[in-house]
Amino acid sequence: MKIGVLGSGDVAKSLAAGFLKHGHDVTVGSRTPAKLADWAAANAGAAIGTFNTAAANGQLIVLAVKGAVAEDVLRLAGAGNLKGKTVIDATNPIADAPPVNGVLPFFTDFKESLMEQLQREFADAHFVKAFNSVGNTLMVNPQFKDGKPTMFICGNNEKAKAEVRGILDQFGWETADMGKAEAARAIEPLCILWCIPGFTSNQWTHAFKLLTH
Ligand SMILES: NC(=O)c1ccc[n+]([C@@H]2O[C@H](COP(=O)([O-])OP(=O)(O)OC[C@H]3O[C@@H](n4cnc5c(N)ncnc54)[C@H](OP(=O)(O)O)[C@@H]3O)[C@@H](O)[C@H]2O)c1
């Protein structure tokens, strides 16, 4: 599959490397593609370009940019390039302020998540929240002694979620589908929970698991 990854940070690079590892065709986008040259040289087969180029090349889009600029980046990517496509939304609405006792501040509230805002602005794209509640080093085929961890996802389009479930299967995750876009009000704050042991005890190597009968 052709994947357009929007972002040049750790999440974009980790996920892009995962897609390459699993045989996908990847274009990674940035405002300044040159900053990805060393990464592309070390990751055979990766193409780099602008946000617009990455979105145009991708049949499926990965959004992996700072939450506060997610809407700006999608505008640069071009609404037309997102139309009808699945957009994996890995972003978190983290505010520009330090954590308090390990608890990150968000710029959203429980009435509307960042993903709902993006879905409203880019109504023709099919957003699926995923990969936001785990550190980037654990996103692709993480190994835990207790088995596969759980990725909580949500989104309004069933076909898009099925596509993301297939990718999560490849990337070594169990998928827990929490329903429509509103569920992102609960899934985005999992990032806050995930980060607390990191900030308070320098523990960054855990993931969530949903136990069911
Ligand atoms: N770090 C993690 O382990 C982790 C785990 C789960 C979820 N997340 C979430 O994933 C997202 C990406 O995280 P990250 O740590 O990889 O990177 P990041 O530092 O949060 O974001 C870097 C990206 O944001 C873009 N950006 C920053 N300011 C911009 C602006 N004014 N206009 C347009 N683009 C701008 C950069 O674009 P350029 O390429 O043009 O510079 C770059 O691609 C975040 O929302 C984060 O909360 C992070």
Image (cartoon, grey):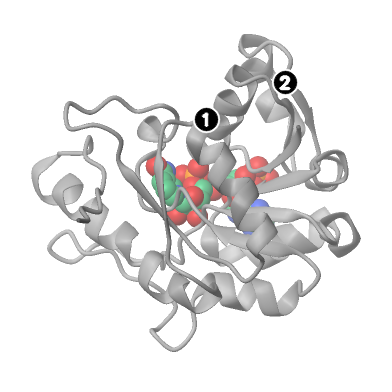
In percent of width and height, residue 194 lies at: 25, 53
Q: Residue at x 70, y 20 (%)?
A: 37
Report the side of 119 relative to 113 (left or right): right
Vertical order, 153 against 135 (above or below): below
**CA separation in Å, label 1 and label 2:** 19 Å
In the image, 60 versus 9, the foreground residue is 60
In percent of width and height, residue 147 lies at: 24, 31
Q: Name the residue beneath numbered marker 1.
A: 170
In the image, 86 versus 40, the foreground residue is 86
The reply to whether the residue tagged 1 has its Cβ within 8 angstroms of ligand 1 is no
Vertical order, 63 against 100 (above or below): above
Point out the frontmost of discs 1 and 2: 1
Instruction: Quarter of the image for the N terminus: give it.
Output: top right
Residue flagged by tag 2: what amino acid is it?
Ala
Report the side of 126 relative to 183 (left or right): right
Lower sequence index among marks 1 and 2: 2
In percent of width and height, residue 144 lies at: 23, 28
Vertical order, 118 against 131 (above or below): below
Instruction: Quarter of the image for the C terminus: give it.
Output: bottom left
Q: Residues within 10 Å of mark 1 (few under 14, many from 20)?
A: some
Q: Determine the residue located farthest toward the front in the rendered image.
A: 213
Which mark is on residue 30? none
Disc 2 element? loop
Report the side of 97 relative to 170 (left or right): left
Q: Residue at x 46, y 48 (%)?
A: 131
Residue flagged by tag 1: what amino acid is it?
Gln
Please indicate, yes or no, whether residue 63 appears anywhere in the rendered image. no
Q: How many marks?
A: 2
Vertical order, 111 against 33 (above or below): below
Picture quadrant where residue 183 is located:
bottom left
Q: Name the residue beneath numbered marker 2.
A: 46
